[in-house]
Amino acid sequence: MADPPPLIAAYLRKRPDLVRFFTLRTGSAAMAEDVVQDLFLKIRDMEPPENLRSADAFLYRVGSNLMLDRAKQQRRQAARDDAWNRESVGEGAEPAAPDPPADEAVASRQRLQRLLDGVERLPPQVAAAFRLHKFDGLSHAEVAQRLGVSRSSVEKYIMTALRTLMAEVER
């Protein structure tokens, strides 16, 4: 098998060092891996410059340039996204939050389902007081009037519901 070209040989020898170097520079192992991969793609078919004194130094220089290009691209993209958000959101409205990661969304849906299931298992008066207060937004006095009980009973019902539901959601 033929020896690899000099830049590829240097890359293969220095790859772990390059990843460490760019991890420290970018603060992200994933970003460093991307930069080092881009570096390989850049040098794969490249003829080394005639005046090349150090293949190692050349790799670090090209990789640093790629890292800077990537950082500039990310800044431009963030600026474009911010501009788009400002333009697309109506006067006085809040921009939409980005979608949460899939695992967080699933966990949130599961917690919500446990909460709703827990409300169904509450005693009828406790569940009714909780729904009227938390879901319909009625005050304790309004809930008491609607259910025909005292305000202190409503407060006890809601505290019972909250304690039960907190335990339900946390398990």
Image (spheres, rainbow, N blue to C red):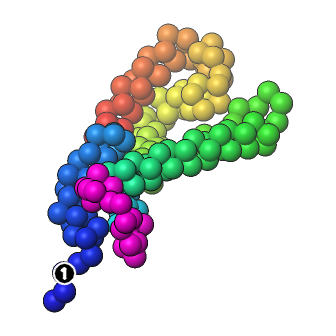
Tell me if residue 33 can be seen.
no
> Where is residue 32 shown, x and y percent of the image?
33, 51
Q: Quadrant of residue 45?
A: bottom left
User: Residue 51 lies in magenta, yes or no?
Assistant: yes
Q: In the figure, 21 relative to 150: above or below?
A: below
> Where is residue 65 shown, x and y percent of the image?
44, 50
Q: Is residue 42 left or right of residue 9?
A: right
Q: Residue furthest right?
A: 91
Tell me if residue 79 can be seen.
yes
In this view, the residue in front, 49 or 74, is: 49
Q: Is residue 44 left or right of residue 15?
A: right
Q: Which residue is mark 1?
A: 3
Secondary element type, mark 1: loop
> Where is residue 25 shown, x and y percent of the image?
33, 40
Q: In the figure, 74 relative to 94: above or below?
A: below
In this view, the residue in front, 57 or 136, is: 57
Query: Residue at image x 79%, y 27%?
Result: 92
Query: Residue at image x 73%, y 44%?
Result: 84
> Where is residue 163 shown, x and y percent of the image?
36, 25
Q: Which residues are magenta?
A: 41-59
> Residue flagged by tag 1: what amino acid is it?
Asp
- The C terminus appears in which quarter of the rendering? top left
Query: Residue at image x 37%, y 66%?
Result: 50
Instruction: Count every numbered label the image shows and give the total.
Output: 1
In this view, the residue in front, 167 or 25, is: 25
